[in-house]
Amino acid sequence: MSAVSGSAPGRRTGGGIGGGTGSSGLEAGRRAVVVIVANSPGEISGWARPVVARLRASETGTAPALGGLVVVVVVPPCAFASGHETEVAAAIPGVDAVVGPSEYVKYALFGVVPKGFRQAQVAGTPDGGRGIVVHLGGDPMHSALLARRLGYPAVLYSDRTAGFVGSFARFMVEDARVEAKLRRKGVPGEKISIVGNLMIDGVTADLERDAARAALGVGAGAPLVCLMPGSRRQQIRYAMPFFLRVAEIVRKFRDEAAFVAVLSPYVSPSMVGAAVRRAGARREAPEGRHLGHAGKRLEGAGGRLVQASGSAPPSPGSESALSESVEMLPTPSCQRAPLGAPSPSATPRALQPLENPEESVNPRLEPAHAFVIETDEGVAVRLVDRDRYDAMAASDVAVAMPGTVTAELAFLGVPTVVAVPMNIPEEVPLPGLPGLLGGIPVIGRHLKRAAVQKAIERIEFTAIPNKRQRRMITPEVRGVLTAQDVAIKVLELLQDAKARGRIAVELRQAMGQPGASDRVAEMVLETLVSTGGRRR
């Protein structure tokens, strides 16, 4: 990210980020501003990251017209946010500045110029510079407001539909289904372009499957189950222990099974350690191994977070200090394998020492590849954060919460049991008024439970490949669940190699081909040049 002087935020006094005015059209040598709006984990990592990469790769070809680009990511408030979106966006290669939720609100409502916009000027954007707003998810209202304040044209990518259609110069959509929805809203056909599925462009597995499994210490014939509990704090608190309990049940029937938990960039080992420690404490309570409030229980396994000696120490002041949740184990003296995993001869409870410890994508989080969860029943689950797609692609079956990850797993051809436990509906995030009602004292919890139940009844499918094909390709388990409900589906898939093969083929077909980010970047730059970077 560009350096920035210590100037205090100011108020917008005119067009453009800096408040000045400039001549119409793009002038050679003047860098244009691309303001990307995205606000949830899937959109930041799955959509914004590949688009930024393609914009940077394409900008040299348009240099005579643009003079280069300044990329600013704006993160509006979102009910589905993890709280770490700003830090993760700042670490995306090619991003010059980031505007967080609170700064965005001040700018949208009162015109207070965010620090991130000032950083864009330091990076070379002159006052009154030209630019474009690119909506990559969330409420289109935010992009419409920004475009109006900045005086920039706006374009929108959508995999469903959109509001505020009069505020956008161009619409980039996933498929003909979304195009039809926008046409029904009165959007002219010439403004709509089908670009494909953006969320798969950032998914790349570099290692061959056998090499990845060897790096993870998984034997040639051992089934590998991948646990993906989500990105948000509440998901880690409840879904992580629940998935660990699923692993314990699976191990009882398939004692050769190996397990990995692939963590989102928004999740730290500290969060996982706190979750399993809390689950273990509740297991000792009279209620047994269940999590949640009275009458709404969700099973969960307790355990401990094990850190291999020789790995990087946890960052000071991290949440739920690791000294309370991590045990140090001796590590065999041998070279570290890829993926931060032990060699097959290593003790299963310890990872190899890291020769070059990498900082997590979020600098406030500890690197997950140095940790293993050992459940109370002795099941070892290795945490993976880097080379995450290699670990996912090497898995025979995955267990996941709904979200972008179901699309990533589908693109990799991994049969997935998508679990939607409704045992604690008041913990499910909801946007808008229903989410706010949940905060009302006494009755809020009951109102939110009713709102969540009504919302889930309207949803036909929760896994993205199932939604795209409008049929059940990969299994979903919904309702008030036990860990056994999910474990049965996992075991069924593990026992039927033919079914796994068929599902893998259908999943890949459902997700289509990559390349949407190239087309999005091309249309962003075309619109930027054709409009001169000013709203008409």
Image: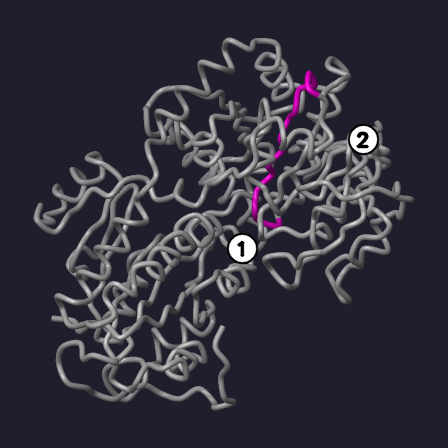
Which residue range is magenta in the image? 220-233
Vertical comparison of 29 with 536: above or below:
below
Answer left or right for 108 relative to 378.
left
Q: Secondary structure at mark 1?
A: loop
How far across and down, in percent of the image, does residue 167 sit?
18, 62
Residue 474: numbered disc: none
Camera-side mark, 2 or 1: 2
Is residue 369 something one can see in this rendering? Answer: yes
The residue positioned 28% from the left and 55% from the top of the image is 521
What secondary structure is found at the residue carrying circle 2?
A: loop
**Label 2 packing within 10 angstroms: few (<14), some (14-19), many (20+):** some
On the image, the x and y values in percent for residue 526 come to 18, 60
Q: Quadrant of residue 44?
A: bottom left
Determine the residue positioned at 45% across, 74% down. Answer: 103
**Does residue 370 appear left or right of residue 229 in this picture?**
right
Question: Residue, x 64% and y 26% (percent of image)?
Answer: 225
Q: Mark yes or no: residue 437 visible.
A: no
Residue at mark 2 to residue at mark 1: CA–CA distance: 28 Å
Q: Residue 267 at what x, y percent from top left? A: 63, 51
Q: What residue is shown at x 43% (from left), y 48% (from top)?
A: 46
For this orientation, the residue located farthest to the right is 330
Work out whether residue 301 or residue 18 is closer to the camera in this orientation and state it.
18
Residue on which the image places disc 1: 439
- Against 512, residue 263 (above or below) is below
Disc 1 residue type (three-letter): Gly
Judge the density around disc 1: few (<14), some (14-19), many (≥20) Cα neighbours within 10 Å: some
Q: Is residue 305 magenta?
A: no
- Judging depth in this view, the residue of 520 and 152 nearest the camera is 520
Return the disc, 2 or 1, that comes first in the chain's sequence. 2
The label number, if any, that marks residue 288 in the structure image: 2
Which quadrant of the view contains residue 242?
A: top right
Quadrant housing the C terminus: bottom left
